[in-house]
């Protein structure tokens, strides 16, 4: 099994290492031809504006849309989630994005870096043990479309993990923890 | 569901999100927007870029909060700001303003010639410059969440950044071949905390993100630092002191992503206009070299 990690900017090495630990062959994706033969793709955390511009510049946006259109799963963490959203609130006007998932996300929804936090999150799809989630200048999901399932929310009801068929998005960073459950959950979608 | 803020994980985590990116020095809202539109992963809010600090002389201090707020208002990407080495009150002010990262920087005139800031006391993460492994691990011991080479800021000359990167990475390579019993003596020799020496040996890299800084002026310079093994690049005077800042900024952002692809590097290096005028390090008197500040 080969799973790609978009390696334009951000914390892609952390995903690569996690995939390798799970016995999957990770592939760093920087150009459209790197998508060939992959079973799934992860878009990491980083700056969504930076990644969007680089993806647009090298003609990666449409090939990733086609990749998803062919039924292969895509997971975005933090900035990756922003790139997947149909609607971006507090974004930079004209910010290039994939616009694949029927959600509206707000960038930097908790404030600035001093408001970044860690918290234990209840994620029923992963079992009873809470998932320790790391939120870094994180976005939140403010609206979900009809086909979108909410996997986890904060205590105030704000959605922070969602799934729409083979599309997965989390506002936090499972790749910064030692907890492999979200990565395993994503790998299940490739089957 | 208790929320913990200001933890080591979230501080080091923001640095991890900056990897593979370019952090650009900006002195006003317009430059900040240009940097964001060019794909910078963060900006450094300054009153003067290092080349001007070098040219004008005098005591260089933290920027006016008004200036920093103007830049924070203008962009959605993280905003960093510099305080003087050892000036923990400037750091407190920057934290109160809500900057996302503080650079305890040798580019400003040091406020303490013996001590750096105890960075563990802050919720906001810090980045510090280092010329060698001992200096890097001392800063991490004080709580730095990110390290950068010092290079020689404001010169447009990458030679010092290369020297510092090679020193840190070379020392780490040596460390990974050492027997366990050699590490205490090595820690003593380089003046670094023993636990961090052991951790670095085990990881085969610094425990925090490590950027290049100080003298990067071209896409080739940026790619050189990446190929040497740096996690990302700061560009100070190199962009807004050049002939065509927009084009150069875009090119350097791409160079950091495609650092291993000479064909793409050749394509993006074409027709960038005049780079900033460089300075030969040997012509700078010892006492005017910024990299020697910090202890």
Image: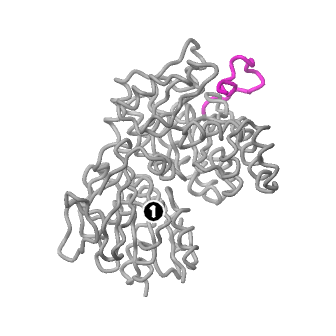
Question: Going by the picture, which residue comes out furthest to the bottom?
Answer: A191
Residue at horizontal 43 percent and vertical 38 percent from the top: B124
Image quarter (top left, top right, bottom left or bottom right) of the C terminus of chain A: bottom left
* Coordinates of residue B294 in the picture (x, y in percent): 65, 26
**Residue B279 highlighted magenta (yes or no):** yes
Crowdedness near tag 1: few (<14), some (14–19) or many (≥20) residues, C-alpha within 10 Å: many
Residue at left offset 79%, top offset 37%? B189
Residue with the most extreme left position? A146
Residue under label 1: A44
Residue extent of the magenta highlight: B276-295
| Vertical placement of residue A157 versus A26, above or below | above
Give whichever of B256, B142 is nearer the camera.
B142
Quarter of the picture containing the N terminus of chain A is bottom right
Q: Nearer the viewer, residue A25 or A157?
A: A157
- In the picture shown, does residue B190 fall above or below A53? above
Q: Please state the horizontal and vertical placement of residue B241, each as a whole percent of the image.
A: 54, 30
């Amino acid at each position: 099994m080969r799973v790609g990690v978009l390696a334009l900017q951000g914390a892609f090495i952390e995903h690569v290492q996690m995939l390798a630990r799970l016995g999957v062959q990770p592939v760093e994706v920087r150009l459209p031809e790197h998508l060939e033969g992959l079973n799934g793709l992860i878009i990491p955390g980083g700056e969504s504006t930076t990644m969007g511009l680089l993806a647009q510049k090298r003609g990666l946006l449409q090939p990733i849309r086609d990749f998803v259109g062919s039924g292969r799963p895509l997971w975005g963490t933090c900035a990756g989630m922003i790139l997947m959203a149909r609607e971006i609130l507090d974004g930079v006007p004209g910010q290039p994005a994939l616009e694949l998932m029927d959600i509206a996300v707000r960038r930097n929804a908790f404030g600035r870096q001093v408001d970044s936090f860690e918290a234990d999150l209840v994620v029923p799809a992963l079992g009873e043990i809470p998932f320790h989630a790391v939120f870094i200048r994180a976005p939140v999901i403010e609206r979900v479309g009809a086909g979108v399932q909410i996997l986890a929310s904060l205590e105030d009801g704000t959605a922070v993990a969602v799934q729409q068929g083979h599309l997965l998005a989390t506002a936090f960073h499972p790749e910064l923890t030692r907890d492999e459950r979200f990565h395993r959950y994503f790998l299940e979608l490739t089957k | 569901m208790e929320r913990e803020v200001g933890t080591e994980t979230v501080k080091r985590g923001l640095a991890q999100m900056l990897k593979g990116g370019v952090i650009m020095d900006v002195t006003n809202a317009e430059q900040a927007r240009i940097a964001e539109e060019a794909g910078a992963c963060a900006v450094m809010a300054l009153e003067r870029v290092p080349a001007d600090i070098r040219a004008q002389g005098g005591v260089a201090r933290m920027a006016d909060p008004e200036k920093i707020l103007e830049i924070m208002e203008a962009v959605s990407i993280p905003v960093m700001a510099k305080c003087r080495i050892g000036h923990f009150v400037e750091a407190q002010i920057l934290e109160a303003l809500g900057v996302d990262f503080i650079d305890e920087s040798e580019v400003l005139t040091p406020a303490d010639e013996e001590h750096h800031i105890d960075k563990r006391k802050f919720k906001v993460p810090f980045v510090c410059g280092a010329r060698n492994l001992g200096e890097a691990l001392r800063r991490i011991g004080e709580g730095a969440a990110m390290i950068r080479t010092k290079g020689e800021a404001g010169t447009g000359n990458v030679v010092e950044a290369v020297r510092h990167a090679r020193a840190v990475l070379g020392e780490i390579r040596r460390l990974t071949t050492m027997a366990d019993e050699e590490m205490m003596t090595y820690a003593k020799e380089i003046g670094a905390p023993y636990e961090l020496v052991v951790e670095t040996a085990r990881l085969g890299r610094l425990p925090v993100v490590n950027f290049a800084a100080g003298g990067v002026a071209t896409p080739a310079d940026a790619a050189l630092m990446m190929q040497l093994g740096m996690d990302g690049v700061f560009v100070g005077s190199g962009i807004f002191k050049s002939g065509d800042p927009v084009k150069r900024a875009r090119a350097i952002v791409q160079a950091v992503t495609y650092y291993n692809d000479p064909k793409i590097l050749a394509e993006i290096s074409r027709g960038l206009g005049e780079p900033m005028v460089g300075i030969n390090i040997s012509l700078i008197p010892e006492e005017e070299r910024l990299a020697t500040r910090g202890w």
